Image (cartoon, helix red, strand yellow):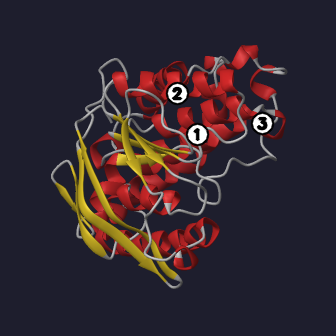
Amino acid sequence: MESPHGAPRGISVTAEDFGLRGPRGWAFRGVRIDAEPGALIAVEGPSGSGRTCLLLALTGRMRPTEGRATIGRMRLPKQMAAVRGVSALGPAPGVTDLDPALTVREQIHERALLQRRFGGSLRSLLRPRSERRASMRRHVDHALAAAGLDLESLPKGPRTSVRDLERLEELRLSVALALIGEPRLLGVDDVDLKLSDAERAEAWDLLRSVAESGTTVVAVCSEAPEGAVVVSTASAGDDEDETEDETEAEAFATEVDRAEAEADDEESETDAETDETDETDETDETKGAADAFAETGRA
């Protein structure tokens, strides 16, 4: 994991005649993209036009069936696992939902534990526990700042329940959680859903700021903002009746992601075995992580 004080390197996104056909027809097809690293890419189209499917395909979470796409030097669909390794999803209904039963602090704490345990390199896992905690605190603080989320400004501070967050606050929290891992590509679904004009402008300012800091952003919306690289899915399928419903696409994406994750687990058996010496410390680490986050006052 890179230092939070250094700007993450964005990644280019290109696609030519990119398409995905599902059980009920084409979700999207004929998509063309040419975006430089650090670009803000707006996937524009009406609900049900395959926007979410395209977002998941570009982040390596759905397998395309037509055309080609490259994320940096990684080709889709051949290198889906590698693309997932450099990308992260912010809010994506049905895929990365926040847990309404948790507080904001608990939601951040949970993501930080997962990132620290599974998101780092083997070398980072061999570092002393205190160093890993301090490093993660810095990454959490940096992600919260980048997402513009001030925990103390929430109704009950970090103890505010996720279910009590306003829509824009939910967006900021989801983006912050995704940025903890310092991805080179950030995917965000339904940016402008249930937002007022003023809130919509704030949301796009947030994503534009993330892109300007170096992270390439792909954001699904009904209307693209000025200055974005616009990709339209309005006429993605040959027949409107055959267009794949986004809800079904999200369920399909979950199944594909699970299958891909199993393949990744098999590939990383060696790393898992080398982690065995660290397993004894993990129980103590999990118990102590809450104290570490409490010390920061930001978790």
| Residue topped by disc 2 | 204
Q: Quadrant of residue 46?
A: bottom right
| Residue topped by disc 3 | 103
Circles 1 and 2: CB atoms closer than 8 Å: yes
State the separation of the CA atoms marked 3 and 2.
26 Å
Note whether residue 288 is visible.
no
Q: Nearer the viewer, mark 3 or mark 2?
A: 2
Which secondary structure lies at badge 1? loop
Q: Nearer the viewer, mark 1 or mark 3?
A: 1
Q: Quadrant of residue 198?
A: top right
Note whether 191 is above or below 30 in the view shown: above
Q: How many numbered marks does the figure carry?
A: 3
The x and y percentages for residue 271 are 31, 61
Tell which of 124 and 251 is nearer to you.
251
Note whether 205 is above or below 13 in the view shown: above
Tell which of 274 and 164 is nearer to you.
164
The amino acid type of the residue labelled 2 equals Trp
Kindly give the residue lying farthest to the left in the view shown.
73
Which secondary structure lies at badge 3? loop
Mark carried by residue 191: 1
The amino acid type of the residue labelled 3 equals Thr
In-image side of 247 versus 89 (left or right): right
